[in-house]
Image: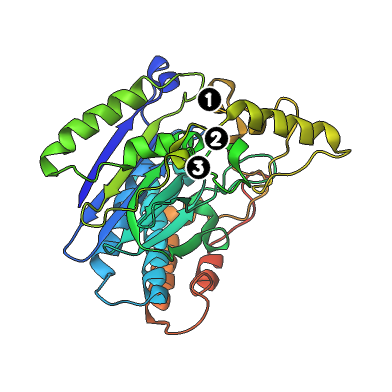
Amino acid sequence: MIIYKSNMAGPYHIENGLPCQDSYAVLQSENFCVLAVTDGLGSELYSDIGASEAASSAVNYCSENLSVNMAFEDIKKVMNNALVCAYKAVLERAACDNNDPDEYDTTMCLAVYDGEHLYYAQSGDSGLIALLQNGEYYRVTSQQRDDEGRVYPLCWGPDKWEFGCVKSPVSAFMLMTDGVFEQMCPPIMRNRDIDINVPLARKFMDHFNATENDIFDIEKWAHEYLEHYPRYLLDDDKTILVLINTERKPKEMDEAYYAIPDWESMKTEALEKLYNNSEEPDNQDGERIDSNSTSIESEMYISKDDETLTDKKPISKNRIEAQNSVANNSIGEKISDAQNQYDSQKTGDTETAHSSAINDVKKNDCST
């Protein structure tokens, strides 16, 4: 089992003296590997701190509460609690700094792996793909954005959080923040039988002959590859975490499976669909397709130069807020109560077990 990573500020942040707002955390035990990537919202002042707090808190919680032979529902509960714990850590840090918690908003993609099965929790628009033992590259998560492309960060709570398990045995997987994810799973490939840029994913995930001694060289290669990735395609911060189970080598597919996608034909097809329909069609993630849409660009990435919507939260939101309550720790205490309630609950919907307690601390929409 090898794990490697790459984490760097994007060109826009470097040029403007801004920190990398991505973060990550990894913990490996005898029975589980727990990995998380987080992406602080660029429109928030301290989101790099929020991303760091959330990643480390979620991974630590999972590592301390997972045990061998747990059923999926129990693992799901642990991951749900981990996201509660992560957001509680963000709120507490904001209170400690005497700042508005809005300024610490972050996304979260969390993965738990037991050597065969892959479990995940998703909040926002970072992403996770897997290489199955049958040789197939598989997109595990979808980006959580509203109809106008604005991301749902961690603060939205269990109403938006998603949990799941990959049914097939997994040989390798890759977590990444949204900019990299949109290169691995370009919008133009959505709704296709193969919705991953397989040859690109293969570069990062097909290292089954590697050993622990090779990790430094692989990380160096990955860092240089991402660092020099064309800016017009990827201007954002770039973070990846890759786990490769060298003892579970995948089946080799036909060479055609690894061919470079035919970008031009896909773009032509998308344009034909656009102009042949009286109404603009929606893609599966709710984004509108128009003649200028990134959804019809084969190698699209939304540049942060234009302060794009993907870096902003939905305007209408019912979120945990109230800075004064955070300052006197009432929110932290109530989320702790929610977490304890969830730990003790034996049955019921895992997404709503602590909702009532969290709702107690939700206030009026702070953006209206």
Considering only order in the chain, which callout, 3 or 1, is on the residue closer to the N terminus?
Answer: 3
Q: Amino acid at mark 1?
A: Lys
Q: Amino acid at mark 3?
A: Ile
Rendered location of residue 51, percent (x, y): 38, 43
Q: In percent of the image, x 48 and y 37: which residue is there? A: 197
Considering only order in the chain, which callout, 2 or 1, is on the residue closer to the N terminus?
Answer: 1
Q: In percent of the image, x 40 and y 24: which residue is there? A: 10
**Helix, strand or loop for disc 2:** helix
Disc 2: which residue: 311
Q: Amino acid at mark 2?
A: Asp
Nearest the eye: 130 or 255 = 255
In the rendered structure, the answer to whether residue 148 lies left or right of residue 15 reads right
Q: Quadrant location of residue 21?
A: top left
Residue 304: assigned label: 1
Q: Quadrant location of residue 33?
A: bottom left
Residue 196: assigned label: 3
**Helix, strand or loop for disc 3:** loop
Relative height, residue 257 to residue 16 (above, below): below
In the rendered structure, the answer to whether residue 363 lies left or right of residue 50 reads right
